[in-house]
């Protein structure tokens, strides 16, 4: 196998040599520990049906071609990835990150660069769909080995059928970090914690022969790639009994097979029972058995005509020697009977019932976590009240939210590599920052908007009811926190915004009073033209003042 290809980012925050544990680190990636020295071992064997992950992924892709499955997948993908005319499907959110504005701007810039290298704005639907169907996603991060400080130069998609993540135990080593573990347990020769090597194996032309439990890779073409060179994102759904990563389509395998069998059996039943068939009773008199049978065949061949179309050659030929289940029946009758008679055998009576088909369709949608109401073609989205919306829609919205969070791990890994290579942050800084980095996906769920609108209306209605009791039984702070559900930070921000808008003259001052009457003004601080006392000029005589006073009294 060729030499290790790719790059590695050393983590300086390594554990001291004295820190040992008998329990290996938990890794939620569906990769088990392989004790053998090679990577060509048994990977997965699920119920004896799927021998390798290769077979498993092929099965998922075949399922996605089924119309019902494809419709459910499109519902999930369209809900998770919303293509807007002006906005990107996803943006990075750094409001909770404790870093300088310069670092935040750099992170936003690098995130936009990663999306441009992936062409995510245009291919987001395709990328998310591939990840949802396969249950895993691989990307190769290409860098300039001579100038790694330039960061990632290109991001290339890798077919999951050609890539395998391997976690392999190294050859027998009795020491871990300089600590002798041979006799860690008295009377035991078993090592506490074997040293594990993690890498990827890329096979451009995988060769998985039929009957092979684990499959074999061609050692001449397989390439061993460093762990940090690959972005690996799983679905988060694992079979802990078998130790493998599954797709969300895995739960629907049985339901889809049942639906297919029911549909096929329904077609066969309707084809066989739909037509009316006739029964011919032929009077053979006193003819001997052999002659009676010959006579029956002659009559049948005389009135029977069977033209068959050959789809392979395009020819029409006469096959009179074959009898299908849809043809008429010919039965002999001896002398003394009622003579020749023709009766009709009716077809099936309950051919219009589809309750079993509908049941398995609903079962398939439930297995795919898609609301059953979306099956019906006339089942439009109700924009009335949120109480009229089925609870399945709420569960579906939460399911899509979990998918988004899992899918966003792809951006986290790429962003980590880019920032560390460009010396923007250190691996230690990333550990503290990554927990606060969020990704804001464009949301297009009308139910969420409807729910928020109704909650706001209900809170304002409660506020109007309780307003006369504010200052008597309830405080203003209690109403804002318990009724309006405003947090401390929201209260501070809202108060600052109100003061600023009052100062700018956008809204009136609610505390403004009439300078003459001393009563609060209606409409706040928009005082208009307030009459004031006239200024008295010293040059005005007492006679003029007396005259003005009398005029005012009149």
Image (spheres, rainbow, N blue to C red):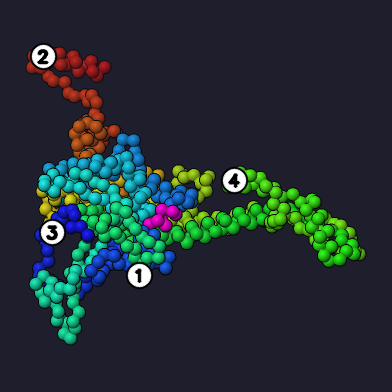
Q: Secondary structure at mark 2?
A: loop
Q: Residue 200, which numbered label? A: none
Q: Nearer the viewer, mark 1 or mark 2?
A: 1
Give the percent coordinates (x, y) of residue 503. Answer: 19, 34
Q: Nearer the viewer, residue 410 or 537?
A: 410
Ranked by sequence position, the earlier of labels 4 and 1 is 1
Mark 2 vs mark 3, CA separation in Å: 95 Å
Q: Mark 1 and mark 4 in contact (Cβ < 8 Å)? A: no
Nearer the observer, 186 or 336: 336
Q: Which residue is mark 1?
A: 241
Viewer-closest of 137 and 169: 169
State how far apart marks 4 and 2 are (Cα). Answer: 128 Å
261 shown above or below 20: above
**Residue designated by label 4:** 313
Q: CA distance from mark 4 to mark 3?
A: 69 Å
Q: How many marks?
A: 4
SS category of the residue bearing label 1: loop
- Residue topped by disc 2: 541
Q: Residues within 10 Å of mark 3 (few under 14, many from 20)?
A: few
Residue 57 located within the stretch drawn in magenta: yes
The stretch in magenta equals: 56-63
Quarter assignment of residue 190: bottom left
Q: Can you give x and y, in whole percent of width and height, for residue 331 in the image?
A: 80, 61
**Spatial separation of the CA atoms under disc 4 and disc 1:** 52 Å
Point out the tag, 4 or 3, that comes first from the N-terminus: 3
**Residue 37 magenta:** no
Q: Position of residue 14 (x, y in %)?
A: 12, 63
Label 4: element kind: loop
């Amino acid at each position: 196998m060729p030499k290790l290809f790719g790059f590695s980012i050393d983590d300086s925050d390594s554990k001291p040599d004295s820190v040992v544990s008998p329990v290996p680190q938990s890794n939620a990636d569906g990769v088990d520990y392989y004790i053998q020295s090679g990577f060509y071992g048994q990977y997965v064997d699920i119920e004896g049906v799927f021998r390798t992950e290769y077979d498993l992924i092929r099965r998922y892709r075949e399922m996605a071609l089924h119309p019902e499955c494809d419709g459910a997948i499109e519902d999930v993908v369209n809900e998770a990835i919303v293509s807007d005319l002006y906005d990107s499907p996803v943006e990075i959110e750094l409001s909770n990150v404790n870093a300088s504005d310069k670092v935040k701007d750099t992170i936003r810039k690098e995130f936009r660069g990663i999306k441009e290298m992936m062409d995510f704005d245009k291919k987001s639907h395709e990328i998310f769909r591939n990840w949802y169907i396969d249950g895993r996603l691989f990307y190769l991060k290409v860098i300039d080995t001579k100038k790694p400080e330039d960061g990632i130069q290109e991001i290339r998609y890798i077919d999951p059928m050609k890539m395998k993540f391997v976690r392999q135990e190294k050859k027998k080593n009795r020491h871990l970090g300089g600590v002798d573990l041979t006799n860690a347990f008295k009377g035991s020769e078993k090592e506490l914690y074997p040293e594990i090597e993690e890498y990827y194996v890329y096979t451009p032309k995988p060769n998985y022969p039929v009957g092979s439990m684990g499959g074999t890779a061609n050692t001449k073409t397989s390439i061993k790639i460093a762990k940090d060179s690959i972005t690996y994102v799983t679905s988060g759904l694992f079979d802990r009994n078998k130790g493998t990563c599954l797709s969300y389509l895995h739960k629907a395998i049985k339901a889809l097979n049942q639906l297919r069998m029911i549909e096929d059996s329904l077609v066969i039943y309707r084809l066989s029972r739909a037509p009316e068939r006739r029964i011919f009773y032929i009077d053979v008199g006193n003819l001997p058995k052999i002659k009676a049978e010959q006579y029956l065949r002659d009559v049948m061949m005389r009135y029977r005509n069977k033209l068959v179309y050959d789809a392979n050659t395009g020819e029409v030929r006469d096959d009179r020697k074959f009898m299908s289940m849809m043809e008429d029946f010919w039965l002999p009758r001896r002398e003394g009977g009622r003579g020749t008679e023709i009766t009709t055998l009716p077809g099936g009576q309950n051919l219009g019932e589809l309750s079993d088909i509908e049941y398995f369709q609903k079962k398939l949608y439930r297995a795919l976590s898609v609301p059953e109401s979306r099956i019906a073609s006339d089942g439009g989205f109700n924009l009335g009240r949120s109480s009229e919306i089925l609870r399945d829609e709420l569960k579906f919205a939460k399911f899509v939210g979990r998918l988004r969070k899992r899918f966003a791990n792809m951006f986290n890994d790429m962003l980590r590599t880019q920032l560390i290579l460009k010396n923007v942050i250190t691996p230690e800084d990333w550990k503290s920052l990554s927990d606060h980095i969020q990704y804001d996906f464009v949301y297009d769920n009308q139910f969420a908007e409807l729910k928020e609108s109704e909650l706001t209306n209900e809170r304002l209605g409660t506020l109007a009811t309780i307003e006369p009791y504010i200052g008597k039984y309830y405080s203003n702070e209690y109403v804002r926190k318990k009724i309006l559900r405003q947090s401390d930070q929201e209260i501070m921000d809202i108060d600052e915004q109100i003061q600023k808008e009052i100062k700018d003259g956008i809204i009136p001052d609610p505390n403004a009073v009439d300078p003459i009457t001393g009563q609060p003004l209606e409409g706040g601080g928009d005082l208009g033209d307030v009459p004031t006392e006239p200024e008295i000029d010293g040059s005005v005589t007492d006679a003029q003042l007396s005259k003005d006073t009398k005029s005012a009294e009149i």
